[in-house]
Image (cartoon, rainbow, N blue to C red):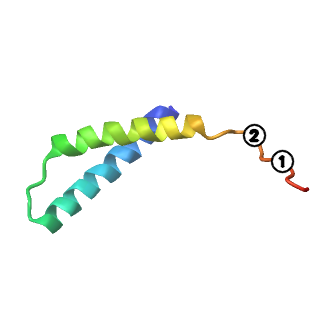
Amino acid sequence: MRLFWTFFWTFLLVQMATYVMGSMQGIGYHFATGALLGVIVTILVFVIAALIPDEPAGDHHH
């Protein structure tokens, strides 16, 4: 379920960003471009989340 919600919100945010940036540059909105970027960004989010350690950092007193 976590995968679904992450993809859902990432997809919506990337679609919005694609629309806004396209409008600012004066180019048309393409759903396929936003969909491809949404999938890529979702994969990157999960890769980054897997690389970040889950355990606390601990004490760093010298």
Residue 23, position as x, y percentages in the image: 15, 64
Between 24 and 9, the one lying in front of the other is 24
Residue 30, position as x, y percentages in the image: 13, 47
Q: Is residue 32 above or below residue 26?
A: above
Q: Looking at the image, do the residues carrying marks 1 and 2 touch, with CB atoms under 8 Å apart?
A: yes
> Which residue lies under the disc numbered 1?
58
Secondary structure state at the residue bearing disc 1: loop
Instruction: Look at 33% across and 36% down and name the residue there.
Output: 39
Residue type highlighted by circle 2? Glu
Q: Residues within 10 Å of mark 1 (few under 14, many from 20)?
A: few
- Mark 1 or 2: the one toward you: 1
Q: Quadrant of residue 18?
A: bottom left
Instruction: Look at 31% across and 50% down and name the residue there.
Output: 14
Residue 2 located left or right of residue 26 = right
Residue type highlighted by circle 1? Gly
Most distant residue in the right direction: 62
Instruction: Look at 22% across and 62% down and name the residue there.
Output: 20
> Which residue lies under the disc numbered 2?
55
Q: Residues within 10 Å of mark 2 (few under 14, many from 20)?
A: few
Instruction: Look at 57% across and 34% down and name the residue there.
Output: 50
Q: Quadrant of the C terminus?
A: bottom right
Residue 60, position as x, y percentages in the image: 85, 53
Residue 26, position as x, y percentages in the image: 9, 65
Distance in Å between CA atoms under marks 1 and 2: 8 Å
Q: How many marks?
A: 2
Secondary structure state at the residue bearing disc 2: loop
